[in-house]
Image (cartoon, helix red, strand yellow):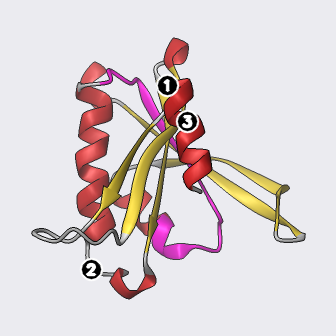
Amino acid sequence: MISRIDDIIHANDGINWCIALKGETQMIGTISYHRVEKEYYRAEIGYILNSDYWKKGIISEAAAAIIDYGFNTMKLHSIEAQIDPRNKGSEEILKKFNFVKEAYYIENYFYEGQFLDTAVYSLINAKEH
């Protein structure tokens, strides 16, 4: 994962942030923009959080901050998220921020010896309309 993050940084194709509890330095997760498509004003958001911290609003707080950063600082037109459709927690977070399901791909992702489905969500910058 660190190697992949380094590649994204060196190619200037994304931004990664560590997630820590306020006032602490221990990393408990990450949130990022990867697959930044500058010419289309679009980027994909991704997040990972240690399961000990699930259901505490941490990803929602981090997502709110980087969605704002994406639209207001990076001047994105849209933000994409690709999730495992079985991950209901991630789906709830996206819906909380008004992401809309755009696509469902069947067995398009190969991970740990098996093909998995992917659900694609998108959020359009409402301030542009």
Q: Which residues are magenta?
A: 74-90
Q: Residue placed at 31% from the left, 42% from the top?
A: 67
**Does residue 102 appear to the left or right of 17 in the view shown?**
right
Instruction: Tell me if residue 121 comes above or below residue 11 in the rendering.
Output: below
Q: Which residue is mark 1?
A: 12
Residue 56 is marked as 2
The residue under label 1 is which amino acid type? Asn
User: Disc 3 designates what residue?
Assistant: 8
Q: Is residue 117 above or below residue 69?
A: below
Q: Position of residue 70 (x, y in %)?
A: 33, 33
Left of 15 or right of it: where is 74? left
Asked if the magenta segment contains residue 80, the reply would be yes
Q: Is residue 129 visible to the viewer in this orientation of the structure?
A: no
Point out which mark residue 32 bears. none
Position of residue 11 measured from the top left corner of the image (x, y, whole percent): 56, 25
**Residue 69 at least partly seen:** yes
